[in-house]
Image (tube, rainbow, N blue to C red):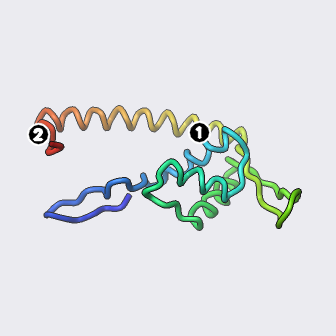
Amino acid sequence: MIIKKGEGCCSPEPGSRIRGFIQPWILLLLSEKPSHGYELLERLHSGSPETPMDTALLYRTLRQMEADGMVRSGWETGGNGPARRLYEMTGEGVGCLHAWTMNLRRTRERLDEFIAVYEERFGDGGRS
């Protein structure tokens, strides 16, 4: 998350990505179908077009996820052009996706509590 300083306060830049949130997104996309890295990049970008995905970060994350056993890959050599690596989620990855989702639900509950207390104290918080 990018912190933007302005007018004496710090706030997240609108539309910024949540730090470390790429792993569950990759797992969720791979749960739909095995994919090449470039296809994952496009699908990640389509969910948040105002915040472009860093290609190097995606491939580093995929390599780490493979080392951790969440995904596996193999070379696809059929068709025209060079061989491309095809990524798919493993059983370990499914378990990680479930754990991420449980954690996100707990985080959402805590965020809802924070916002409720904030709104009790400050009303609409300057939204209008």
Could you say where residue 116 lies in the image, as x and y percent from the top left? 22, 32
Give the SS element for disc 1.
helix
Asked which secondary structure carries label 2, the reply is helix
Give the residue type that dot 1 points to: Leu
What's the CA distance linking mark 2 and mark 1? Answer: 36 Å
Residue 19 appears in which quarter of the rendering? bottom left
Give the label on residue 122, or none.
Answer: 2
The residue at the point 56 percent across, 50 percent down is 23
Q: Position of residue 103 (x, y in %)?
A: 46, 37
Please determine whether, in this image, residue 27 is positioned above or below residue 79: above
Q: In the picture, which quadrant includes the N terminus?
A: bottom left
Count of marks placed on residues: 2
Report the front residue among 127 and 113. Answer: 127
Figure quadrant of the C terminus: top left
Q: Residue at x 44, y 58 (%)?
A: 51
Q: Which image quadrant for residue 82? A: bottom right
Report the side of 91 relative to 18 (left or right). Answer: right
What residue is shown at x 78% (from left), y 61% (from top)?
A: 84
Q: Nearer the viewer, mark 2 or mark 1?
A: 2
Check disc 1: other Cα within 10 Å, few if <14, some if 14-19, many if 20+. many
Where is residue 14 drawn, in percent x and y? 32, 54
Occupied quadrant, residue 86:
bottom right
Q: Nearer the viewer, residue 103 or 31?
A: 31
Of all residues, the one furthest to the right in this rendering is 78
Label 2 or label 1, whichever comes before in sequence order:
1
Give the residue type at disc 2: Phe
Answer left or right for 2 relative to 51: left
26, above or below 116, in the image = below
Residue plotted at (59% across, 50% down): 43
Q: Is residue 128 left or right of residue 71?
A: left
Q: Position of residue 29 (x, y in %)?
A: 62, 44
The image's mark for residue 97 is 1
